Amino acid sequence: MVRTENALAEERSTDQNKAQKRKRSCRVQSNMKRLIAEMAEIREQQKRIEEGEMEIRESFQEIEFEQDQLRKKTLLISKQAARNQHTLHEMFKIMNALENSNLSEADGLIQCLRLVSPDSLSLSFFLYASLNLTRHHPLKSSSLIYIYGFLFQSLIYLFPLYELL
């Protein structure tokens, strides 16, 4: 009988060991499943982070491109403003020469303006016409007003504001 009790005790202990092994294996499997799920979630988070980084990188590249374009436009505007300032200065010199009836100086300044600012070609034709007109008819104040008016209309035509934008 002792043997049977030992045998029964051994069976119980083996049954308990098997039950404990099952519990452990169930715990290990549930831990594995939880870890696999966490790893999948971490993978998704990493993927979202990478996508976010790519979007930020692209937006930085777009900003750098726009900054480059703005820098080029600013440089172009400053060059154009300097050219316009020089052209205006030359035109006022021409108008002063015409006011003082210094026709040879006005002629030279018109030639200079024509060489420096080819875009003001129509204005230089007008100034030549006014120069020829003043050679035959001395300038009166009314004709000077007409010339100044035409000069400023020509300026508006030659240097429109939309070119600066």
Image: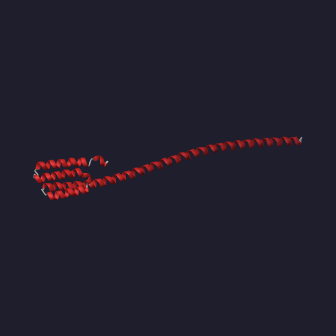
For this rendering, which residue is in front, 34 or 151? 151
Image position of 77 (left or right of 111): right
Image position of 12 (left or right of 84): right
- Identified at 82% across, 41% down, the residue is 11
- Identified at 30% across, 46% down, the residue is 162
For this rendering, which residue is in front, 63 or 79? 79
For this rendering, which residue is in front, 60 or 79? 79
Image position of 90 (left or right of 6): left
For this rendering, which residue is in front, 161 or 91? 91
Residue at far right of view:
1
Q: How is the image coloured?
A: secondary structure
Question: Is 149 above or below relative to 94?
Answer: above
Quarter of the view holding residue 3 = top right
- Identified at 77% across, 43% down, the residue is 17
**Figure label count:** 0
Residue 37 in the image: x percent, y percent?
Answer: 62, 43
Which quadrant of the rendered structure holds the N terminus? top right
Residue 60 in the image: x percent, y percent?
Answer: 45, 50
- Identified at 53% across, 48% down, the residue is 50
Residue 23 in the image: x percent, y percent?
Answer: 72, 41
Residue 55 in the image: x percent, y percent?
Answer: 48, 47
